[in-house]
Amino acid sequence: MSEAAPPAEADDGLPTPRRTLAAAAILAAIVLAVLDGAIANVALPSLSAALAVSSSASIWVVTGYQMALVVALLPCAALGESLGYRRVFTAGVMIFTAASGLCALAPTLPWLVLARVLQGLGAAAVMSLLAALLRFTYPRRLLGTAIGLNATVVALSAATGPTLGALILSVASWPWLFAVNVPIGLLVLAASRALPGVRGHGRPLDGMSVALNAGFFAPLVVGVDLLTTHPGAAAALLGLAALSLFALVRRELPRPAPLIPLDLLRGGTFRYSVVASVCCFAAQMVSYVALPFYLQHGLGRDPLTTGLYMTPWPLTVALAAPVSGRFADRVPTAWLCAAGGLCLACGLTLAATWRLEGHITPLIGFTMLAGLGFGFFQTPNNRNMLLSAPVARSGAAGGMQATARQCGQAAGAVIMALLFTVAPSGIAPRIGLGVGAALALAGGLVSLMRVGR
């Protein structure tokens, strides 16, 4: 299959037999990336003991992956527009699969961290181009449904990841947590030839812009991580990140297709979708961090009970996302996103304010309401973000979509870290849930600014 696409392909998608195989490759790649992130967190205590390193050192297994992922998202999106989405996506799957094998063979922590960095680079090529590939795989009338299915797979993978990781550790050693990626990656590669072939524009990436992009995101990720423990070093790193961003914007501003999609951000519809996405993903991460502490430290529940009470949220997202996707193909997405943000805010407000000391069963309803809201926000917002960009900039839109998600989640984690620093541990989680409610409401209100556009 050549890297050329007929002009109608963006609107009409692929023919049905090929579309099914292409969708399977895309969804399997999503499972690969999301499950790996969830499983790696579960592995930290086991690999810390096996490699004889401290718990704080083992965190670099997660930090190295996240840093590489965030640094590479926008360059990989630009590379997809240059060389063709399928080619770069397939290369990303190959790198991720090979790096998974290296992780499984790692004899030391530095080896493992370097392999995780490679995994992050491969994951960036996959995640930054998912939206663009969906746009060319499905006809426009089904795009909301496709994005909803994507969100369902993400939610289910995130929900089952910790349990799957625990099951693997119960019967095997930690390297198998990474080895299981290899057969999945090979299956994705086998199906990837069915992906839409879209010819790239062939313009090379600007090396200085890529370096400045890394100079922004890498110090940002590390600086945010050090904010509560080493504020001086964190301030220096964040200052370096700000200078790099300033230089990058100045360099890219006059370009017709900049690395950071400034051309897309000038459009109000795309810009509002990005801001709303950052707000709601920050609300989600604040809640995901706050709820376990609230349940265990505030309400005295054990880890198993905590896990069970955390599960209804992602399961409700998985159920709501395809429904909201169908609605998004028929109803103005601004109203759907606003309603989703409001539901998310209501669920978090109830979780923060309801007295649960005697019975915590109402928390199930609150987290389901939050999950329903997030599901009804996420799919229409992602659809709007993608379709508000020109077809030729689908890669940049998808890269910005993934970057907004990562930035929102990082912001949510920082907010909770700061709250644990300045507030008593008994009330910090409930304050965090309140902050999450405010962020979700802000995301919904920002979405309303798209009405009539």
Image (cartoon, rainbow, N blue to C red):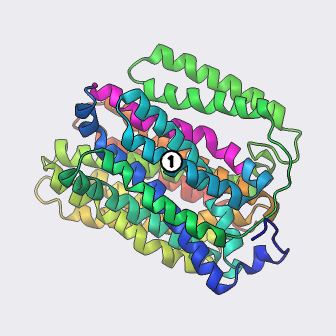
Asked if 89 appears above or below 233 in the picture, the reply is below
Q: Is residue 35 left or right of residue 140?
A: left
Number of numbered discs present? 1
Instruction: Kindly identify which residue carries mark 1.
Output: 98
Is 389 colored magenta in this rendering? no
Q: In the rendering, at what x and y percent does residue 134 appear?
A: 64, 69
Asked if 373 appears above or below 229 in the picture, the reply is below
Residue 132: quadrant of the picture? bottom right
Q: Amino acid at mark 1?
A: Ala
Q: Secondary structure at mark 1?
A: helix
**In which quadrant will I find the N terminus?**
bottom right
What secondary structure is the stretch in magenta mostly built from? helix
For image coordinates 50% across by 76% down, the residue present is: 322
Dot 1 surroundings within 10 Å: few (below 14), some, or many (20 or more)? many
For image coordinates 35% across by 29% down, the residue present is: 108
Q: In the rendering, at what x and y percent does residue 179 appear?
A: 37, 51
For image coordinates 60% across by 51% down, the residue present is: 92
Asked if 285 appears above or below 196 in the picture, the reply is above
Is 59 colored magenta in this rendering? yes
Q: Single out the residue that lies furthest toward the bottom.
A: 16
Residue 289: quadrant of the picture? top left
Range shown magenta = 53-78
Camera-side residue: 318 or 205?
205
Q: In the rendering, at what x and y percent does residue 67 appear?
A: 53, 36
Q: Is residue 356 left or right of residue 332?
A: left
**In which quadrant will I find the C terminus?**
bottom right
Residue 61: quadrant of the picture? top left
